Image (spheres, coloured by chain):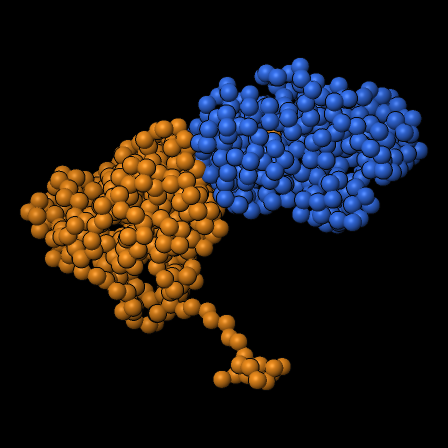
Chain colours: A blue, B orange
Amino acid sequence: MTVMNMIQAINSAQNVMMERDGNVVALGEDVGYFGGVFRATEGLQRKYGKSRVFDTPISENGIVATAIGMAAYGLRPVAEIQFADYIYPGFDQLVSEAARMRYRTAGEWFLPLTIRSPYGGGIFGGQTHSQSPEALFAHVAGLKTVIPSNPYDAKGLLIAAIEDNDPVLFFEPKRIYNGPFDGFFDRPVTPWAKHPKAEVPEGHYTVPLGKAAVVREGEQITVIAYGTMVHVALATIEAQGIDAEVIDLRTILPVDIDTIEASVKKTGRCVVVHEATRTGGLGAELSALIQERCFYHLEAPVGRATGFDTPYPHSLEWAYFPGPIRLGTAIKKALED
Amino acid sequence: MTIDPERRNRPALELYVPEPHARPGDEPDFSHIIIPAAGSVPRPDIAAQPGEMKDLAYTLVRVLDEGGQAVGPWDPRLHPDTLRRMLRDMMLVRVYDDRMYRAQRQGKTSFYMKSTGEEAIAVAAGHALEREDMTFPTYRQQGLLVARGYPLAQMMCQVYSNRGDKLKGRQLPVMYSDKAHGFFSISGNLATQFPQAVGWAMASAIKGDSRIAAAYIGDGSTAEGDFHAAVTFAGVYRAPVILNIVNNQWAISTFSGIAGGELTTFAARAIGYGIAGLRVDGNDALAVYAATRWAADRARSNLGPTLIELFTYRVEGHSTSDDPSAYRPKSAGSNWPLGDPVARLKQHLVVLGEWDDERHQQLSDELEAEVRAAQREAEKLGTLVTSSIEFPQDVRTMFEDVFEEMPWHLREQQTQMVDELEAKRK
């Protein structure tokens, strides 16, 4: 075991997979010699050579499309989109091509392709470096979407994504790359070193896709979160002194409905929290699923604490971000209703 | 000159919208097309630098002259047996297209797309490429499958979406896919295959393989961003790929000028990216063969990609859903100055003393019979069902292959669908 932050864990996952499988290649803007703007591929080109780890032109369209071609050939490309906000030029290739290749060829061609991309706000990145587009991809038949919340899961989930035979979107909450930010922006952030999930095995292991984690057991209410919001949820309930059950989804699609259902049936109350805009967001889908399955167990309406339906503002970041105040209010309402 | 009413000292701006040379009711007018003599274009060594061959993007590589002789440095000097096989495959594509077009009109399928006038482009390339090279076609390169000996009945099953359709009725007719025949799955989202082919070729180079990729795109869809991404990546990484632009002059009802074809040639796009570019008579099977071979040899020698504009004419409508007499002169196809690819290759074989009208007629009859037999075989497995819930496929297959393993939500929806259909049948 080694103590790693999220970046080191993500780097280690790629390193482990490149070592084990000669078909794994990494590509993207600045990922080669420099090792990525967030250093997620640092050292990999030196170790595995330029033909397996290389810089690409600034063309998300081209990055996704050529990665699809490589996967069709039989490689397992890991393509980095520098910020999730930049993924849209590759959207057609992801939605119309990657997502449907297995289906439209009746399994003859499949695409073991991983798209890594830092997402989410909290770093004063303004509207072009802060978005959370996961719901757009969860809406597409044929794509898996994964979001880790800690270094241990990040490495295990990324290895599972690379080994998966279908395209996986792997969104990395960049606000917690260096420490588990809990939404209290006026307090110093503890580094990962002090967190139990920063103990990461150096070798190969996987965290299965499609399985959520109950990160805190509780009786009063279920809080469903993923990414940065897992830490916000834990800090919020601690501050409020509430015995909540906190679920870290880890995979957005396919979502782990069994874990959600069991928890909500137990607590009878639920709040979903995400940083993405509210309308048509994952909270809407989850709340529909919960009322379909747990209606007669519910003591209160399913609540949502989310980003607002505006672009992500620069200076007003902490008014936008669904931190402990917004989540705490939603939890309080769900407990009082 | 009109004046800007707000700024009276300046002329008013006008938007220019290109118009084709002839519209319905006009005589077809191809007088603007410059056709250099066959054999007049030099053939550079495959190791030549792209910068040394810029002229080749503005001319037209032609081998077959008006008398049916193969002339000049691009003559691939093919054995008469090869020429006859190419002629046969081109004729077969035409017969097949006619039968399937008729089948659509008879209500046996929803949709069809012919490649009339463009048969040389896919068939000659199919013969020039190695069998293991991967092609990334558009919907008008069915000739690649024919040239590689793919069973006609299987193609028809795909067109009919019937019980024999290996794609399980999931794809629109003509969107074939066959890995074993090096024919990549066709997408209705145009141009997407172009950068995918580049990625496949890059992978081949990454692995130290010797297979190359050949991609196809239409003149119209070169306007997509995918085209720019493809040529950029192909150039940057010297990918072993042939990037073919099939300029058949029309994108549904829109002439090539709307894709920028009035301003320069499509082959000239290569110059801006610093890669080799050729402009080739797409109705001349020998020129297509020679250009493909030249580009393939370059790619195989790590000399990088080649962009080839195949200059041709879409003789028929875009698809069975299109009526070209609504936007261009009716006789445009038969007046195309570069002639008909089948007739030109036939003439060449006759001039060589390797073919005659009698053998041609005999072959034509044989191919008709072959296609009819394939059609009977395919139709035994059904044709497209549009007015019944007695589907050709097990309906449960609708949920397969979305993912390698079916997740819970698809299993749930699958059960829901089966229940719905059972309720309807009761």
From this view, report whether residue A7 is shown above or below residue B352. Answer: above
Residue at the top extreme, as displayed: A1
Q: Quadrant of the C terminus of chain A?
A: top right
Q: Position of residue A205 (x, y in %)?
A: 61, 17
Q: Position of residue B395 (x, y in %)?
A: 53, 31
Q: Quadrant of the N terminus of chain A?
A: top right
Whether residue B224 is visible: yes
Residue at image coords 61%, 38%? A37
Residue at image coords 22%, 45%? B45
Q: Is residue A17 left or right of residue B201?
A: right
In front of the other: A20 or A134? A20
Q: Position of residue B197 (x, y in %)?
A: 41, 39
Q: Is residue A15 left or right of residue B260?
A: right
Residue at the right extreme, as displayed: A336
Residue at image coords 74%, 44%? A124
In front of the other: B287 or A219? B287
Q: Is residue B175 left or right of residue B50?
A: right
Residue at image coords 81%, 35%? A183
